[in-house]
Image (spheres, rainbow, N blue to C red):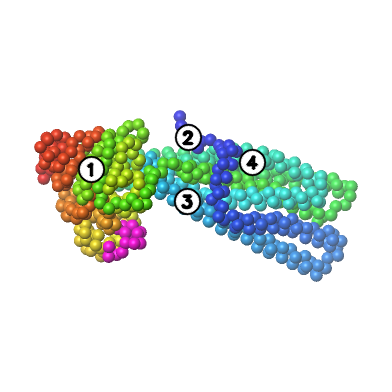
Amino acid sequence: MEEKSEWAKSFSLKEQAAILKRTFQFARPFVGTFIFAILFSVGLAVINVYMPQILQYFMDHYLQTKSATMRILYFFAGLYFLASIIKALVWFGQWYLYSVASIKTLNRIRVILFEKLHQLGIRYFDQTPAGSIVSRVTNDTETLYDFWNVFLMVLTGLLSLVSSFIAMYHLNHTIALVNLAFLPLLILIIITYQRLSSKIYRQMRERLSELNTKLNEYISGMHIIQQFRQEKRLKDSFEKTNTNYLHTRYAMIKTNTLLLAPIINFLYAIGLSISLTMFGFKAMNQPLEVGMIYAFTTYVQNFFRPMTQVMDSLSTYTDGLVAASRILKLMDVNETIPKQTVDETAKITHGKIEFKNVSFSYDGKTQVLKDISFVADENQTVALVGHTGSGKSSIINVLMRFYEFAEGQILIDGQDIRSFSYQELREKIGLVLQDPFMFYGTIADNIRLLNPEISDEQIIEAAKFVQADQFIEALPDDYHAKVIEKGAAYSSGQRQLLSFARTIVTNPKILILDEATANIDTETESHIQQGLQNMRQNRTTIAIAHRLSTIRDADLILVLDKGRIVERGNHEELMEKNGLYAQMYALQASSEEVNQ
């Protein structure tokens, strides 16, 4: 049985009001443009009232009396043509101003949403599929453009309905009231449609989000899919998700077919028939003016036609309401980056790091770090070793302030890490990951990372410093060579060298190496060891070591097991203890001998 999510239900009126109130706040900077568009809408309603009266007057006073001359004919034709031009200009002004304000609002929402994503902590991205996030920033925000147009349709519809009824009432009170009697039925149809469609649209948006998530995962992992020949299985999985989405679209089509334009047009036909019948009965007793009947039937059409437009736009309204709720839900995520109590005088000058009884949990239940304490003095290298899941990366995560730790204290140069601004931490702490991410662009772009303060000379110096200049300058376009998505055209060693240059170009005081040579072959590693040695000079270094042979010269080696430090010392001291480190080192040494 399919599990129903929070999206598989309709919105209550209270929920709709709350969503609309918050969504309208994004349009506040452009309220002036919206107001001018509304004024044009009022002008359009007035023009729609007076245009039929031009023809009514011509019919009743000239055609019916057979007194029309060519001069009068040209006069009324020109007058109606002029009114049509004015109507077209007013209509253009209305839609242009409203569309400009809408697109600016959409742009503002997308920028605010993108800024919000940058404020979220790493925990949120660990728990949320990338495809779902992309869907909200692209599809959901794009839906809001049409969503804003719904309000213009409703406004123009109400203005047309009110103005048409007033005009009808002025011509014939009784028949106008008969047509007004259809209004409660129209409102009932609107309410029924809105309740049914909101539930379907919420399901449809969820299915679309699932579709985007799978697309993102499958495209990103295409080399794995092809390597393990999983094309058919994933095709079936994708087809199932796509079919679920298709079924919600079918349900929406059925609802729209039943409750939108067809039923409104049916009611219009009934209203028009009743009006003409009543005029027919009246004509049996007294003569009627043909122009008046023409004008009245035109107003009947203007009375019902906006309802058709409003009903047609209700599907867009419901879709936009769901999209807005998903965007607002993302806005409400409080999984932000850890808070800092910034001391503006706090600066990292020496790079001494001290952990004091630090404990940490990702889920608030299971501790992955337990009472961690150590000191990395200025310009020292401290290596973290241990089996998978021992807590090495977690130490890096709390030191980089990607996650908030619950107990203990972390000091840098004797000051609490929470007292530094994020700008200071990011400028003075350089991080090199095991699997570096390359952005689409050029090699220079990937080293500079859009920092305008970094000159081309600094990029070249950084590349030479980490021994990356040799392969870069061998390329046809050297530092302007193209980098395709994720740097697929370069080897893992070359990508890692670029990440070294990216880190070192900012001249950090503290260097963090997260298994920086884990995915590099032995031959390539021998070439980049000099780059690592250069990077560690005059810097405090915290290195997660995959290959223990690469950290033999570390000043301090911490051996972790199940979140605790079980051994500490330099290489010689730990080998003499013949403990966990010695076992791991011997195992790796024998493995390397076998591979050779």
> What is the number of the mark on residue 375?
1
Q: CA distance from mark 1 to mark 4?
A: 69 Å
Secondary structure of residue under mark 2: loop
Residue at coordinates 56% horizontally, 39% vertically from top-left? 15
> Which one is in front in this view, the residue at disc 2 or the one at disc 3?
3
Q: Is residue 16 above or below residue 345?
A: above
Question: Where is the N terminus found, in terms of image quarters?
Answer: top left
Q: Which residues are magenta?
A: 445-458
* Residue 143 percent coordinates (x, y): 52, 49
Classify mark 1: helix, strand or loop: strand
Quarter of image, res 85: bottom right
Q: Of label 2 and label 1, which has the lower sequence position?
A: 2
Give the residue pinned by disc 2.
5
Of badges 3 and 4, the one in the foreground is 3
Q: Tell me which label, 1 or 4, sits earlier in the chain.
A: 4
Task: Please state which amino acid type lies under the numbered disc 4.
Answer: Ile
Q: Residue at x 20, y 52 (%)?
A: 536
User: To which residue does mark 4 refer?
Assistant: 190
Residue sitting nearer the eye, 171 or 75: 171
Viewer-nearest residue: 138 or 334: 334
Judge whether residue 446 can be spotted in this image: yes
Residue 588 in sight here: no
* Residue 552 screen position, x and y as percent: 14, 45
Mark 3 and mark 4: Cα distance apart in space = 33 Å
> Residue at (39%, 42%) from the top-left corner?
124
Looking at this rendering, what residue extends furthest in the bottom direction?
A: 71
Which tag, 2 or 3, sits closer to the chain's start?
2
Q: Nearer the viewer, mark 2 or mark 4?
A: 2
- As measured in the structure, the alpha-carbon distance from the residue carrying label 3 to the one carrying label 1 is 41 Å
